[in-house]
Each structure stands twice: as structure tokens, then as C-alpha cells.
Image (cartoon, coloured by chain):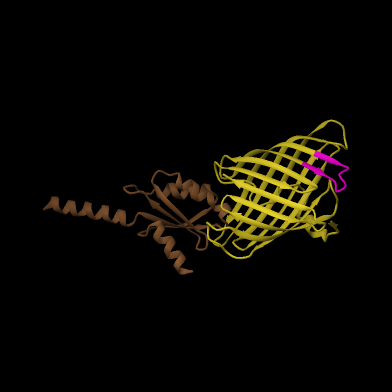
Amino acid sequence: MKRINLMVVIAFMSLSQSALASMKVTVNGMVCSFCAQGIEKSILKMDETKAVFVDLKNKVVVIEAKDGKTLNEKLISQEIKDSGYDVVKIESISQTVAQFRSQAKDKK
Amino acid sequence: MKHPFISSGLSVLLMSIPITAIAAPMGFKNSWMFMGDFSKTYQELSLNYATTANDAFGFSANAMQTDNSVAKQQNLEAVYTRKLARWNFPEAQANIWFIGGLGSTTGNTFNGSKAMASPGIQVDYETTRFYSMASARVYAAQGATSNITTARLGASFYEVDYDQAQPWLVIEAKRMTFVSNQYEFTPMLRVIHNRYFIEVGANLSGQPRLTFMYNY
């Protein structure tokens, strides 16, 4: 019984990890693509990053992890700071970058 | 065309200095910034590398000449750029930059080559639709000192997504004491698209102007 419970917990954890495979970062100071491209470039260089979407209008950056990888919140926060911006909030979200981008365009 | 300018207040504000009169004079950490500024009276090419989020080191070559091309001066320098302060707001950004060069200058108004120092400062404030900047830089050499002061205002036609090109209308007031003590006004069309930044315009005398920045 204990073994079954453990397996259920492990399965649930892996499910929730893949369901929340993206991070949505609210960033202060992003005013143009010329300035904000540093964020995209530095986060794309990270091994665990699959895709990045910079949403200038809503001042958020969405980062999607590669399958089986976990995004490092502290590292992402530092990269954004090194690009010259301030991180206001980091949230885990269930959408992929493609889904978030599509939703953002639908809102217009 | 050099117009007498309302200069007192602005001049006091700006103090003195020539500058690559564009947006941020350096890129993000571990990036290269390549910049150019070309007009009849001023030409500059510069390159720097950002070693941190706040510091960049590079080189600049620039040349100035009077409208009648009688007096000419060329400067070659190593340049240090420092982001002294940045304020990030939800909808805006403000910066104070120090730009300082050390190098040599040559010209046809004096003999030989002279050592030159070129300290300068730039302040800017921008949103996704509005841009303002003021800068001042002194090119100091024994018997051949001049300065450049610049102020810019700009507005974008509309907001864009990150991956779209954004056009702006920018108006610049610039005084290069090597050329004239009067301010020169130049309206320009600016286009920003990711790592590219270009401005094209002409001053009120019709002299063309081109600036660009490329960040990689």
C-alpha cells in the first residue's frame, strides 16, 4: 500500500511539474525591443530553456522549459537583472510559450 | 542650418559634451555594441563590449569639420562607458550614463597630434511611446578643446510587439562648438527592430544625417 501511495505521489509530482513547465516573469523597465533583446538572448542560452517570449505590451517574459528540465528561478532572475531590468514577480504557469503568445495576440 | 537657440536654460542643463546621441550607449552584459553617426560636420564609428550590466569598454574614431570644410579635427580614443544609474518603472525607464574617452586628436588648425580626454554624461527617459535624452561631452586637448551638447525628443507612431519594427519621429538639437556656437536642429525617422536601430533625417539646411546601432 505504501509503495502504491509513493508511486501516486511521484506520478502526481511529475505531472504537475510538466503542467507548470513555464515561468511568467513580470519585468519593470522593458520599453523597446532593442533594449529588451538581452533578456531573450541570455535566457535562451540557458540549457533548460526551450523557448522565450517577450511581451513588451504587458511587460512580461514567458520562459518554457525543455522536456524533463526545470527552470531555475534564481538564475532567470539574475539574467534579467544583468540585462538591466527589475524582476517584479515570477509565477509558474501551465501554458507553453506558443499558447501564451497566441492568447496575447487574441487579447488585442 | 544653424539656428540661434533658446539656449540659456538648456545649455546650463547640458553643460557641455559630443556624444553618440542615440539610446543606450552600451548593450547588455557580454554583448557588443556597434554605433555610427554620419553627417557633413560629424562622423563617428564606435564599438564597445559590455563586461558587466553597467560597464563597457571600446574604441571610437570620429571626425568633425566646419560647414565650409575649412577646419577639421579627428579624434581616436579608447572609451569607457558606465551606467551610473537606472530606474526601471512598470511603463518607463530612466538612465544616467558616464562616457569617457582617452586618446589623441589631430587637425588642420594645429600641428601634430595632441593627447585628448573626453568626459561626458547622458541622461535619458523613455517609455514605449516617448523618448527624451540630453547629453554633453567635452573633447579636451591643449589648445583644441571643443564640446558637444545634444537634446532629443521623440515619439513613436504606435506601440508594437517585441518582434515588430517600431518607427519613431525624433527631433534633435545639437551644438558642436568646433562647428558653431549655434544649435542645429535635425528631425529624423527612427526605426527599431530587435538588435537593429537606425535613424535617417536631414537638418534644416538639408544636410543628411544617418545614425545606427547594432547590438549583438
Residue B103 against residue A24 in the figure, above or below? above
Let me know if residue B68 is in the magenta part: yes
Residue segment shown in magenta: B63-73
Q: What x and y, as percent, mark residue A28?
A: 53, 58
Q: Position of residue B145 (x, y in %)?
A: 83, 41
* Quadrant of the frame with the C terminus of chain B: top right
The answer to whether residue A24 of the structure is visible from this angle is yes
Of residues B138 and A40, the one drawn nearer to the viewer in this rendering: A40
Chain letter, colour brown: A
Residue B144 placement (x, y as % from top left): 84, 39
B156 up-or-down from B67: above or below: below
Q: Is residue B175 left or right of residue B81?
A: right
Q: Colour of chain B?
A: yellow
- Residue B19: in sight, yes or no? no
Q: For the N terminus of chain B, which image quadrant?
A: bottom right
Decide if residue A59 is on the left or right side of residue A20.
right
| B43 inside magenta stretch | no
Q: How many marks?
A: 0
Figure check: B144 above or below A6: above
> What residue is at 52 percent from the left and 63 percent from the top?
A57
Q: Residue furthest left?
A: A1
| Residue B133 placement: quadrant | bottom right
Along the line of sight, the residue nearer the viewer: B172 or B187: B187
**In percent of the image, x 19 and y 54: which residue is there?**
A8
What residue do we see at 60% from left, 42% from top?
B55
Locate residue A30, reporting x and y percent: 55, 57
